[in-house]
Amino acid sequence: MAKKEQKERRWMIPSKRAKGYAEERKKKVRMFGEREGEQLTEFDKGVHAGYFRCQADHAGIYKYAKARKEGKSAKEAAQISRKVGKGA
């Protein structure tokens, strides 16, 4: 029995992965990887949506922690963390 070749993990900057996922969702077709050109399944669409939600949650948590370190109250930090974009 031959040992399987060890694959390397593929790391991507989250914003680049999100950009690729957004392009795939608009075109409804896989654009990357071994299954390139295949139609997106409902499962794939759910994975993409979950990834976007995760990125939004991570950004909110980061903004909240940053605001708290700057001395803002919990209420002020929560308001800052809910703002979308870099203007917070």
Image: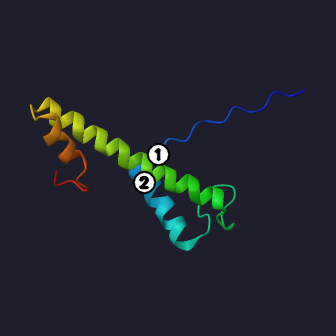
- Position of residue 59 measured from the top left corner of the image (x, y, whole percent): 31, 45
Local crowd size for mark 1, using a 10 Å CA cut-off: few (<14), some (14–19), many (≥20): few
Question: Which image quadrant for residue 5?
Answer: top right
Q: Are marks 1 and 2 in contact (CB under 8 Å)?
A: yes
Q: Distance between the residues labelled 1 and 2?
A: 7 Å
The amino acid pointed to by label 1 is Met
- Position of residue 86 measured from the top left corner of the image (x, y, whole percent): 21, 53
Q: Is residue 19 left or right of residue 34?
A: left
Whether residue 36 is visible here, answered yes or no, is yes
Label 1, secondary structure: give it.
loop
- Position of residue 45 measured from the top left corner of the image (x, y, whole percent): 58, 60
The amino acid pointed to by label 2 is Lys
Identify the residue at horizontal 53%, vertical 55% (top origin). 48
Residue behind mark 2: 16
Identify the residue at horizontal 69%, vertical 59% (top origin). 35
Question: Which image quadrant for residue 73?
Answer: top left
Residue behind mark 1: 12
Label 2, secondary structure: give it.
helix
